[in-house]
Amino acid sequence: IIQKYLDRVITTNKLIIIDRYFFPNKHDSTYVAFVGDILDKYLPGIDEIIFITSSTHNVSVMNDITTLLHTKKPALSINFKFTEEFHDRFWISDHNDKGLFLGTSLNGYGRKYALIDYINTGDVRQVVSELRGQGLI
Protein backbone atom coordinates (compact mmCIF):
# COMPACT_ATOMS: atom_id res chain seq x y z
CA ILE A 1 0.00 0.00 0.00
CA ILE A 2 2.79 2.42 0.86
CA GLN A 3 4.44 1.85 -2.52
CA LYS A 4 1.15 2.56 -4.31
CA TYR A 5 1.19 6.00 -2.72
CA LEU A 6 4.92 6.50 -3.21
CA ASP A 7 4.54 5.76 -6.93
CA ARG A 8 2.68 9.07 -7.29
CA VAL A 9 4.82 11.00 -4.83
CA ILE A 10 8.42 10.16 -5.73
CA THR A 11 8.92 11.96 -9.01
CA THR A 12 12.25 13.69 -8.42
CA ASN A 13 15.70 12.65 -7.27
CA LYS A 14 15.38 13.84 -3.67
CA LEU A 15 13.23 12.32 -0.94
CA ILE A 16 12.54 13.99 2.39
CA ILE A 17 11.26 11.69 5.15
CA ILE A 18 9.99 13.45 8.26
CA ASP A 19 9.41 10.90 11.01
CA ARG A 20 10.56 11.35 14.57
CA TYR A 21 10.37 7.57 15.13
CA PHE A 22 11.96 6.36 11.89
CA PHE A 23 14.96 4.97 13.81
CA PRO A 24 13.09 3.36 16.73
CA ASN A 25 14.31 1.81 19.93
CA LYS A 26 11.54 -0.81 19.75
CA HIS A 27 11.32 -2.72 16.49
CA ASP A 28 11.24 -6.27 15.25
CA SER A 29 14.11 -8.03 13.53
CA THR A 30 12.70 -7.42 10.05
CA TYR A 31 12.42 -3.62 10.35
CA VAL A 32 15.67 -2.67 8.57
CA ALA A 33 14.94 -5.04 5.68
CA PHE A 34 11.36 -3.72 5.51
CA VAL A 35 12.66 -0.15 5.09
CA GLY A 36 15.01 -1.38 2.37
CA ASP A 37 12.17 -3.19 0.60
CA ILE A 38 9.95 -0.09 0.66
CA LEU A 39 12.68 2.15 -0.79
CA ASP A 40 14.35 -0.36 -3.14
CA LYS A 41 12.02 0.33 -6.06
CA TYR A 42 12.77 4.06 -5.95
CA LEU A 43 16.52 4.04 -5.31
CA PRO A 44 17.55 4.07 -8.99
CA GLY A 45 15.90 7.49 -9.37
CA ILE A 46 16.82 8.93 -5.99
CA ASP A 47 20.16 10.68 -5.45
CA GLU A 48 19.50 11.98 -1.95
CA ILE A 49 17.40 11.06 1.06
CA ILE A 50 17.03 13.51 3.92
CA PHE A 51 15.79 11.98 7.15
CA ILE A 52 14.32 14.51 9.56
CA THR A 53 13.90 12.73 12.86
CA SER A 54 14.11 13.05 16.62
CA SER A 55 17.40 13.64 18.36
CA THR A 56 16.55 10.61 20.53
CA HIS A 57 16.99 8.19 17.62
CA ASN A 58 18.46 4.69 17.71
CA VAL A 59 21.99 5.04 16.31
CA SER A 60 22.29 1.31 15.63
CA VAL A 61 19.13 1.25 13.48
CA MET A 62 20.26 4.45 11.73
CA ASN A 63 23.60 2.85 10.88
CA ASP A 64 21.98 -0.42 9.76
CA ILE A 65 19.55 1.38 7.42
CA THR A 66 22.33 3.59 6.06
CA THR A 67 24.52 0.54 5.40
CA LEU A 68 21.67 -1.30 3.70
CA LEU A 69 20.77 1.66 1.46
CA HIS A 70 24.43 2.21 0.53
CA THR A 71 24.70 -1.50 -0.32
CA LYS A 72 21.80 -1.06 -2.73
CA LYS A 73 23.07 2.27 -4.10
CA PRO A 74 26.62 3.25 -3.03
CA ALA A 75 26.41 6.79 -4.44
CA LEU A 76 23.23 7.62 -2.52
CA SER A 77 23.57 10.76 -0.40
CA ILE A 78 21.96 10.26 3.00
CA ASN A 79 21.57 13.22 5.34
CA PHE A 80 20.17 13.38 8.85
CA LYS A 81 18.57 16.39 10.47
CA PHE A 82 17.20 16.45 14.00
CA THR A 83 14.25 18.33 15.41
CA GLU A 84 11.43 17.84 17.86
CA GLU A 85 9.14 20.25 16.00
CA PHE A 86 7.29 17.71 13.83
CA HIS A 87 4.95 15.09 15.22
CA ASP A 88 3.27 13.82 12.05
CA ARG A 89 5.04 11.73 9.45
CA PHE A 90 5.51 13.19 5.98
CA TRP A 91 7.30 11.87 2.90
CA ILE A 92 7.98 14.63 0.38
CA SER A 93 9.57 14.28 -3.03
CA ASP A 94 12.10 17.08 -3.29
CA HIS A 95 10.22 20.36 -3.28
CA ASN A 96 7.79 19.45 -6.04
CA ASP A 97 4.54 19.93 -4.13
CA LYS A 98 3.94 16.18 -3.76
CA GLY A 99 3.88 14.33 -0.49
CA LEU A 100 2.14 11.79 1.62
CA PHE A 101 1.11 11.53 5.22
CA LEU A 102 1.58 8.35 7.26
CA GLY A 103 -0.43 7.96 10.45
CA THR A 104 2.21 5.67 11.91
CA SER A 105 5.93 5.17 11.59
CA LEU A 106 7.11 2.24 9.50
CA ASN A 107 7.98 0.25 12.61
CA GLY A 108 4.29 0.31 13.57
CA TYR A 109 2.88 -0.14 10.09
CA GLY A 110 0.31 -2.91 9.87
CA ARG A 111 -0.07 -3.36 13.62
CA LYS A 112 -3.03 -1.03 14.09
CA TYR A 113 -5.32 0.90 11.83
CA ALA A 114 -3.56 4.00 10.54
CA LEU A 115 -4.13 6.55 7.82
CA ILE A 116 -2.04 7.02 4.70
CA ASP A 117 -2.99 9.72 2.24
CA TYR A 118 -1.63 12.32 -0.11
CA ILE A 119 -0.94 15.80 1.21
CA ASN A 120 -2.49 18.65 -0.71
CA THR A 121 -0.11 20.99 -2.51
CA GLY A 122 -0.65 23.91 -0.13
CA ASP A 123 0.20 21.78 2.89
CA VAL A 124 3.33 20.38 1.21
CA ARG A 125 4.48 23.93 0.46
CA GLN A 126 3.84 24.94 4.07
CA VAL A 127 5.84 21.97 5.43
CA VAL A 128 8.71 22.70 3.02
CA SER A 129 8.64 26.37 4.01
CA GLU A 130 8.85 25.42 7.67
CA LEU A 131 11.74 23.02 6.96
CA ARG A 132 13.60 25.82 5.18
CA GLY A 133 12.80 28.25 7.97
CA GLN A 134 14.35 25.90 10.50
CA GLY A 135 17.40 25.29 8.29
CA LEU A 136 16.55 21.59 7.90
CA ILE A 137 16.69 21.62 4.10
Image (spheres, rainbow, N blue to C red):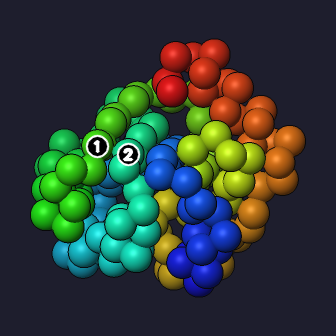
**Residue at x 67% of width, y 33% of height:** 128
Q: Quadrant of the N terminus?
A: bottom right
Picture coordinates of residue 83, whole percent (x, y): 47, 27
> Regarding mark 1 in the picture, which secondary structure is present there?
strand
**Residue at x 30% of width, y 60% of height:** 26
Three-letter code, disc 1: Ser
Q: Is residue 121 left or right of residue 27?
A: right
Picture coordinates of residue 37, whole percent (x, y): 33, 77
Q: CA distance from mark 2 to mark 1?
A: 5 Å
Picture coordinates of residue 28, whole percent (x, y): 26, 73
Front position in the image: 20 or 118: 118
Disc marking residue 127: none
Task: Please identify the quarter of the rendering in which residue 95 is found.
Answer: top right
Q: Residues within 10 Å of mark 2 (few under 14, many from 20)?
A: some
Above or below, 19 relative to 5: above
Above or below, 61 relative to 127: below
**Residue at x 34% of width, y 35% of height:** 80
Residue that carries the numbered disc 1 in the rendered image: 77
Q: Is residue 88 left or right of residue 41?
A: right
Task: Please identify the quarter of the rendering in which residue 124 is found.
Answer: top right
**Residue at x 41% of width, y 56% of height:** 46
Label 2 vs 1, first from the N-terminus: 2
CB atoms of marks 2 and 1 within 8 Å: yes
Q: Is residue 21 shown to the viewer in this render?
A: no
Disc marking residue 48: 2
Front position in the image: 105 or 134: 134
